[in-house]
Each structure stands twice: as structure tokens, then as C-alpha cells.
Image (tube, rainbow, N blue to C red):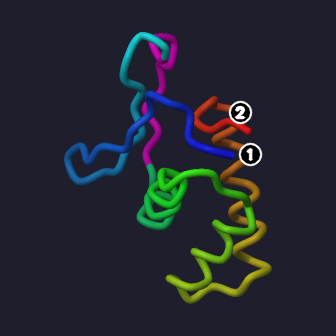
């Protein structure tokens, strides 16, 4: 998977938000706010192709979370991002 072109994370009044930039994202009328952990994972997805497993590994290496909890949370988040069209397979 990878981030879909044209979506970026910005800091708006202290909140991390994903916004669409460019004509391709003209129909993206949502403002998605990310907590610090989700913002970290969004940055990880921006490094290139990724899998759920690579995000789980990054999460467990940088946060005090067990692999099972990380796997559950990452799968849920990736599913939401796929549904919103922020990432693609």
C-alpha cells in the first residue's frame, strides 16, 4: 500500500490534520484529525510502500504497545484510510 498522491498532513492550531491538495482531491470534503500516534503512522506511510506488518513493527518499536494491540489498531486505521481514499493498494 501507499499514500494516495495529493494528501498531506498539516498542523492546524496544534492539531494534526490530513487535507487534500490539488484538483484530484477536490471532492475530499473532510478534515481528518489525527492523534500523535496516528500522525506518526501517517508519516511512516509517506516513506513509500508499506504493509500492515511494517506499520505494526514501527508502532511497537516506538511506543509501549504489544504486537497484538498494535495489529488490531493498525488494521482498523488502515481500513478507515482505505475507505476514505487516503491510501491505495
x, y percent for residue 39: 44, 58
> Element type at marker 2?
helix
Identify the residue at horizontal 47%, vertical 39% (top origin).
Answer: 32
Q: Is residue 26 magenta?
A: yes
The residue singled out by tag 1 in the image is 79
Q: What span is in magenta?
A: 25-33
x, y percent for residue 65: 63, 85
Q: Nearer the viewer, residue 54 or 31?
A: 54
Q: On the rendered structure, is 32 left or right of 58?
A: left
The residue singled out by tag 2 in the image is 83
Q: On the rendered structure, is 88 left or right of 29?
A: right
- Give the residue at the far left of this rendering: 13
Image quadrant where residue 59 sits: bottom right
The disc at residue 8 is none
Q: Where 61 sits versus 18, above or below?
A: below
Quarter the C terminus occupies? top right
> Main structural element of the magenta stretch: helix, strand or loop?
loop
x, y percent for residue 68: 79, 80
> Element type at marker 1?
helix
- Give the residue at the far front of this rendering: 48
Q: Where 25 sits versus 73, above or below?
A: above
Amino acid at each position: 500500500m501507499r499514500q494516495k498522491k495529493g494528501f498531506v498532513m498539516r498542523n492546524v492550531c496544534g492539531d494534526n490534520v490530513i487535507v487534500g491538495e490539488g484538483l484530484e482531491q477536490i471532492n475530499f470534503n473532510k478534515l481528518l484529525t489525527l492523534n500523535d500516534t496516528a500522525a506518526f503512522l501517517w508519516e511512516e506511510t509517506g516513506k513509500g510502500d508499506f504493509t500492515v506488518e511494517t506499520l505494526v513493527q514501527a508502532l511497537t518499536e516506538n511506543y509501549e504497545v504489544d504486537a497484538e494491540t498494535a495489529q488490531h489498531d493498525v488494521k482498523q486505521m488502515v481500513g478507515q484510510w482505505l475507505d476514505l481514499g487516503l491510501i491505495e493498494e
